[in-house]
Image (cartoon, grey):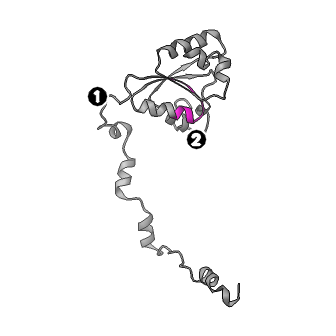
């Protein structure tokens, strides 16, 4: 690196601009403190936050019925977006519950132990627990699917078929 033909490397390595440092003392503390407006927003409770929401207007997917048989993140979020836009989403969970119910972090408080992931991905939905290994439960899902416009599932390939709920059965 020390040769005369390497001046461009020398310039890149030693003449590059140094990162700006925050000034010490009060000026730095002022830049790190949250702004007054942000502190006020954090003091809002849920009812105040949604006070101006238009509950009288249906979403663009109002009237659309969705049956959801999903787990973890991608499938529940897909149906969550549909529900956010007004679709009627019915989530079918296995008896042990969705994996997302048990993953940390959990919501604080004395109520039932719910994870942030579950609360986020399953908002605006109705939930139904069915053991899809039982014929009666499979019949319930078939009746739900017959009245639905959309079926969302994200099991591994072949799992719905093994439950007796394959594409050929539900169409």
- Is mark 2 in CB contact (under 8 Å) with mark 1? no
Q: How many marks?
A: 2
Front position in the image: 135 or 10: 10
Q: Which mark sits nearer the N-terminus, 2 or 1? A: 1
Image height of 139 relative to 47, above or below? above
Q: Which mark is on residue 104?
A: none
Q: Which mark is on residue 56?
A: 1
Q: Is residue 94 magenta?
A: no
Q: Is residue 54 left or right of residue 151?
A: left
Q: Is residue 70 magenta?
A: yes
Residue 169 in the image, given as x and y percentages of width and height: 59, 14
Image height of 85 relative to 162, above or below? below
Residue 83 in the image, given as x and y percentages of width and height: 44, 29
Identify which residue is drawn at 46% across, 74% down. Answer: 25
Q: Quadrant of residue 15?
A: bottom right
On the question of residue 165 being in view, the answer is yes
Identify which residue is drawn at 38% across, 46% down. Answer: 43
Residues at marks 2 and 1, CA–CA distance in whole angstroms: 34 Å
Identify which residue is drawn at 50% across, 14% down. Answer: 146
On the question of residue 122 being in view, the answer is no
On the rendered image, what quadrant is the N terminus found in? Answer: bottom right
Q: Which mark is on residue 105?
A: 2
On the rendered image, what quadrant is the C terminus found in? Answer: top right
Identify which residue is drawn at 61% across, 83% down. Answer: 8
Q: Quadrant of residue 11?
A: bottom right
Q: Residues within 10 Å of mark 1 (few under 14, many from 20)?
A: few
Q: Quadrant of residue 50?
A: top left
Q: Which residues make up the magenta segment? A: 67-77
Q: Is residue 116 left or right of residue 30?
A: right
Element on which disc 2 rests: loop
């Amino acid at each position: 690196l020390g040769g005369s033909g390497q001046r461009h490397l020398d310039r890149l390595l030693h003449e590059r601009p140094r990162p700006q440092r925050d000034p010490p003392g009060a000026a730095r503390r002022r830049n790190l403190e949250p702004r007054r407006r942000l502190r006020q927003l954090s003091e809002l409770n849920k009812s105040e936050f949604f006070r101006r929401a238009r509950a009288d207007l249906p979403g663009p997917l109002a009237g659309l019925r969705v049956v959801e048989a999903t787990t973890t993140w991608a499938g529940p979020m897909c149906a969550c977006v549909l529900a956010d836009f007004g679709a009627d989403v019915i989530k079918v969970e296995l008896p042990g519950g969705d994996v997302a119910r048990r993953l940390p972090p959990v919501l604080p408080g004395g109520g039932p132990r719910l994870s942030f992931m579950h609360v986020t991905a399953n908002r605006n939905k109705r939930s139904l627990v069915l053991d899809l290994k039982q014929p009666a439960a499979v019949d319930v899902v078939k009746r739900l699917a017959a009245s639905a416009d959309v079926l969302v599932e994200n099991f591994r390939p072949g799992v719905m078929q093994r439950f007796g709920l394959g594409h050929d059965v539900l169409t």
